Image (tube, helix red, strand yellow):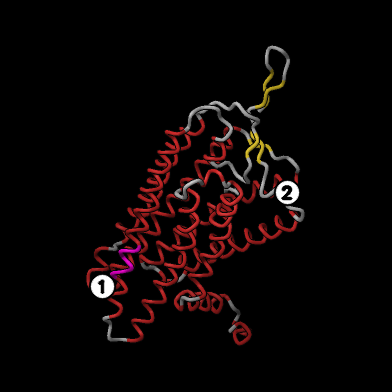
């Protein structure tokens, strides 16, 4: 947005996103790779959501929560990549102040919601393995729906507070953000105000939405592994370990970069590393999640084969299978 002051000088309230590693000499190749990753993430998560919706064998609490994780991943990668690619190929790197606030809000909302949802998914596995007789009662559809709503609401409320606080600071430096998306801490480097109180609030929030959920996840899986070791059935033990290892892999992919960005001492002094970690969290992880959950999951593979066969004409059944 452009306004005109009393001295006829042009004043803009827009920000300039400097993008991903602007000094990189082969940036067009990197952007094309990111675009391919985006299409792969959209396709993988969409297919997983449709499979869970279409196949009755996947109508269980675990897969319902997994479909919500895929939905969050779809939204998360879509908050940054389309704008980044459009800016690069159009040469226009501006983003309005409102647009910047919206991007901060949604990226934080989705990130926090994913933290909370991964915690609830570990609780689901804990009940399924450690208390299977009460699983259908504890993890009813109503409870699962409330869990998902709680994740979204918790993410949105926390994000709204941080976004409003970050956006209210006056800008006194050139409105250039050294990032591929509007991010709160990168934005606050443009202000001359004292932001120490906000930095402390970020640490407290990180403790609440990163360390506490991670502690609960690790506690759940410690109890799960102790139960699995006491199982007499090798088949049941292997199935439990396969499902849990997939979830733990996703947890490490998501929580690892989040801890390094928000809880590492001196992280504000390493913007390039932070940008790389953001790219991993917001772009690569949404592509990897459906692969991790589908390639090692016999139920998802069977559902995919079932959908392909059901959509295949009778005369071409042998070719399809």
- 197 vs 240, nearest the viewer: 197
**Residue at which label 1 appears:** 132
Q: Residue at x 48, y 76 (%)?
A: 296
Q: Residue at x 49, y 53 (%)?
A: 260
Mark 2 or mark 1, which has the lower sequence index? 2
Residue 200, percent from left and from top: 41, 38
Residue 107, percent from left and from top: 51, 46
> Where, by quadrant of the figure, is residue 33 drawn?
bottom right
**Residue at which label 2 appears:** 23
Which type of secondary structure does the marked residue at label 2 adopt?
Answer: loop
- 19 vs 315, nearest the viewer: 19
Which type of secondary structure does the marked residue at label 1 adopt?
Answer: helix
Magenta stretch bounds = 218-223
Residue 106, percent from left and from top: 50, 44
Q: Residue at x 53, y 52 (%)?
A: 75
Residue 151, percent from left and from top: 38, 51
């Amino acid at each position: 947005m452009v306004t005109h002051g009393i001295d006829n000088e042009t004043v803009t309230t827009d920000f300039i996103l400097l993008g991903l590693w602007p000094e990189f000499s082969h940036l067009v190749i990197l952007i094309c790779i990111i675009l391919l990753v985006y299409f792969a993430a959209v396709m993988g998560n969409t297919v997983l959501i449709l499979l869970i919706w279409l196949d009755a064998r996947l109508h269980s609490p675990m897969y319902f929560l997994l479909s919500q994780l895929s939905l969050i991943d779809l939204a998360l990668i879509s908050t940054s990549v389309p704008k980044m690619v459009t800016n690069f190929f159009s040469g226009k790197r501006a983003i309005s102040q409102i647009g910047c606030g919206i991007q901060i809000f949604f990226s934080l909302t989705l990130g926090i919601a994913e933290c909370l949802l991964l915690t609830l998914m570990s609780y689901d596995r804990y009940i399924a393995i450690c208390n299977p007789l009460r699983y259908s009662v504890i993890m009813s559809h109503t409870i699962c729906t409330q869990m998902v709503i709680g994740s979204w609401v918790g993410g949105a409320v926390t994000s709204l507070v941080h976004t409003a606080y970050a956006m209210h600071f006056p800008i006194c430096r050139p409105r250039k953000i050294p990032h591929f998306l509007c991010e709160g801490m990168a934005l606050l480097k443009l202000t001359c105000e004292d932001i120490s109180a906000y930095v402390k609030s970020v640490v407290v929030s990180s403790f609440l939405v990163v360390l506490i959920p991670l502690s609960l996840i690790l506690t759940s899986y410690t109890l799960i592994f102790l139960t699995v070791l006491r199982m007499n059935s090798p088949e049941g033990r292997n199935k439990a370990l396969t499902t849990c290892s997939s979830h733990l892999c996703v947890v490490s992919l998501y929580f690892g970069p989040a801890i390094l960005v928000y809880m590492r001492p001196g992280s504000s002094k390493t913007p390039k590393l932070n940008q790389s970690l953001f790219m991993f969290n917001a772009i690569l992880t949404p592509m990897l999640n459906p692969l991790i959950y589908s390639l090692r999951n016999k139920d998802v593979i069977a559902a995919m084969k079932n959908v392909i066969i059901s959509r295949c004409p009778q005369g071409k059944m042998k070719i399809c299978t």
